[in-house]
Amino acid sequence: MKIDVQNAWNEMMNRIESWVDALVINLPNIIIAILVFVISIFLSKYISRLTLRLLTKSSLQKSMKNVIAKLISVLVILAGIFLILGILDLSKTLNTILAGAGVAGLAVGLALQGALANTYSGIVLSYIKQIQFGDWIQSNDYEGEVVDLDLRAVTIKQPDNNLVYIPNKLVLENPIKNFSTTAQSRVILSCGVGYSSDLEFVRELVNKTIVENFKPVETADDVIFLYTEFGDSSINFEVRFWIDSTSALEVLKAKTEAVIAIKKAFDANDINIPFPIRTLDFPKNVHVSTN
């Protein structure tokens, strides 16, 4: 028993001595590898900042610029790691790492299909010009101002100041309505007047009211006034005009101001906006009690 313990002890000491000898022999390489790693870290940060400066004048989204800078930084660090493995003569370890990375990458790719789809969609959205920071868009039944765009979701601020996070995949695959692609927005307002009204006077009055209350509308020719139908209790019309804004909130405000102005004009000229009316026709042999 004592002989086995002594042999084990001698074997362990021999191993430790061999490891110490290997450490002493490879100490210069280890020092160089540490220096290469430190240099790689500082170099990655410098190149990341330099990339952001070079991309400042580009038309890419801010989020996309950050992504590109981070990817370049990671590539620099990976290059430094591969160089370190070569300095330490760990080529076999490198091959093992690459083989394991391939298998792990396949497994991770299958498990994170949704996340990867959002990442790819975020990269595509960062390149296209249809969505920019500050644009007022409508997508997936949500409407608001684009305040952020990253590799996971598009963030929009709604008129009630709430934030909505829409996955990039849904934004890319579904229609996008961008109200900010033009300099103006059209306001469309529907109303109705009584059957006894002078229709030509109503048209002239509405056009005049719009011109007086909205600066972008210079003349009555800039207003589109259309009678649309004979309604149940009124003759309905639609008025359309442009405002200098692309925000849906500003369109609603303009519509509100138009409603107030038209109502005041109608009241001043005794023009009636009738309530819905229903006429009940009873047979002659039906007795209606008033008690």
Image: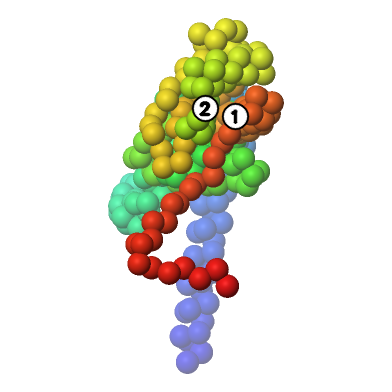
Q: Nearer the viewer, residue 81 or 47?
A: 47
Q: Is residue 106 left or right of residue 213?
A: left
Where residue 152 sits in the image (x, y, percent)? 48, 45
Question: Which residue corresponds to mark 2?
Answer: 197
SS state under label 2: loop
Residue depicted at x 57% and y 7%: 219
Above or below residue 148? Residue 262 is above
Residue depicted at x 49% and y 46%: 276
Q: Amino acid at mark 1?
A: Ile
| For the residues bearing labels 2 and 1, Cβ distance under 8 angstroms | yes
Q: Nearer the viewer, residue 182 or 288?
A: 288
Q: Nearer the viewer, residue 290 or 228?
A: 290
Where residue 50 sits in the image (x, y, percent)? 60, 21
Above or below residue 70? Residue 160 is below
Q: Earlier in the sequence, mark 2 or mark 1?
A: 2
Where residue 37 sits in the image (x, y, percent)? 57, 38
Of the 4 image quadrants, the one containing the C terminus is bottom right
Question: Which residue corresponds to mark 1?
Answer: 271
Residue depicted at x 54% and y 18%: 201
